[in-house]
Image (tube, grey):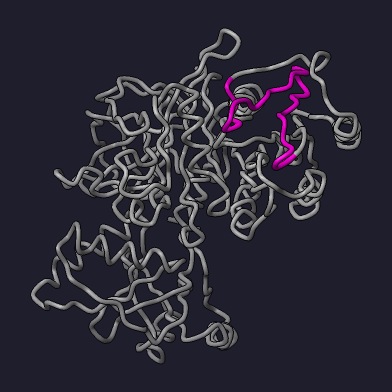
Amino acid sequence: MANNSRRTFAIISHPDAGKTTLTEKLLLQGGAIHQAGAVKARGEARRARSDWMKIEQQRGISVTSSVMTFEKEIEGETITFNLLDTPGHEDFSEDTYRTLTAVDSAIMVIDAAKGIEPQTRKLFEVCRLRNVPIITFVNKVDREGRDPFETLDEVADMLALDVSPQMWPIGMGGLFEGLLDFRTEEVARVEGGSKDYLGKRDKLADADIPENYEEEYQLAQAGYPEFDLEAYRNGDLTPVYFGSALKNLGVEELIDAIARYAPPPRPQPAGEEKIGPERDEVTGFIFKVQANMDPNHRDRIAFMRQVSGTFKRGMKLTPSGLGKPIAVHSPILFFAQDREIADTAEPGDIIGIPNHGTLRVGDTLSEKDTVRFTGLPNFAPEILRRIQLKDPTKTKQLRKALDDLSEEGVIQVFYPEIGGSSIVGVVGQLQLDVLISRLGAEYKVDAALEASPFATARWLKGSDEALREFERFNQGNLAKDRDGDLVFMAKSAWDVGYQEEKNPDLKFSATKER
């Protein structure tokens, strides 16, 4: 049966726009954590609950995308929210991209003073590729910021979206008095010495609002399109909310908006057809693999987005990469930092499946093995490095580590046809730091990265004959990825163009469907 009480969403933002603070406050509102920790205070026992890897704690950023589930009763109905945490650092476009394939909607957080920043824009483009509907949250309105009209117009112009404000800030920075909610016609006030939101709301009629602000919000209501549910769900319009995650202001309205407007589980593309949540058979796809979540047990957890059917613990599912069924005995649901064994799960839920490397990113899981979900690509790396072992006796451990980490999507690994050292490819610099840190911590492999002669890579497709001919002349520039597919290692973008012209029978592809 289709389940309409699930909302699976992600938060996208530029680093420092306040995504982690907002995540904390959403979980706090949903009762998933009872004490939101200060995110940046280092050395404190209470870190942000969603950031648990060592490197994240050192840098105060989210590196791995985790899943947090919480429930909230809204107008008598209990809604289950699955919040997928996307790495907010600009280097993590690939892992973030794949997380966005598993959600039905997104919240875009914008800093009231800075507006749309490059990272937000990149993530927005990914949402647009998949028509993911977006709710905009303008954060930090309690600080000095830009005129709210300016922010709205920027969203409309830069992202080519209709904007429909659902709230309005009364004053900004030092003059900030509270937020007017257009739907309920109530004003949420900040109070007390620290000017936090402590739950006080006045009816608009009783709220003493200075005249100049009255004109402002009337203009905002009249001057922008009204909210249109269909336009929002098609990805053409974004409702805009204002608030301060730090002061817990506007967060409740945001949860309410996700419950009211965000789509329940949507059908997912599987080649020519779309698989909807109402299908009886249990189906899902793996969008992320995380190794060593529990350092005491070298486990790996594959994150599956459930697309259809009712999953029951112990069920047998067939992964597309394997062809033989596996029994899922201890599926995990994630409640902030606590994990619970799931007895059942519904479409839209994210289940963690412990395994020893059998499940890979992009695998489809299903009962009958007739479905293949599409649209989870690998991207051509933008940075390539040679990897040098400091202790040559550890070659085997290194190979295992690189295969594990590439399966997880942290890096891509290329094994040159000629010459010894493996080459790792990443989309952003931070992935290299994560790689070295995890090689040491989890695999006890001491390795260093060196410059590689190559600038980018392209997957090669073509007839056997054309490939053989190409290999004869370019042996030194060829490698195999970990699936054994042939990859052309290019010294520059010009090099790619030159080879494409010379070899019209071959396709040089910058993405590869996983």
- Seen from this angle, which residue lies furthest front? 193
Residue 332 appears left or right of 271: left
Task: Depth check: give the residue in front, 497 or 17.
Answer: 17
Q: Position of residue 87 (x, y in %)?
A: 46, 51
Q: Residue furthest left?
A: 393
Does the stretch in magenta take in 70?
no
Q: Magenta stretch: give its range.
A: 172-198
State the image coordinates of residue 144 (x, y, percent, origin top left): 70, 47
Splitting the image into 4 quarters, where does residue 198 fall?
A: top right
Which residue appears at 57% of the width and 87% of the height?
494
In the image, residue 129 above or below residue 202? below
Residue farthest to the top?
76
Position of the C terminus, as image quadrant, is bottom left
Q: Would residue 67 appear left or right of 128 to someone viewing this image?
A: left
Residue 266 visible somewhere in the drawing: no
Toward the viewer: 5 or 203?
A: 203
| 482 over 218 or under it: above or below | below
Percent across and percent down for residue 226 are 84, 30
Q: Residue 41, can we see it?
A: yes
Q: Residue at x 25, y 76 (%)?
A: 448
Q: Quadrant of residue 305?
A: top left
Quarter assignment of residue 402: bottom left
* Of 362 and 263, the residue lying toward us: 263
Judged left or right of residue 384, residue 331 is: left
For the point 16% across and 78% down, the residue is 390
Relative height, residue 477 to residue 485 (above, below):
below
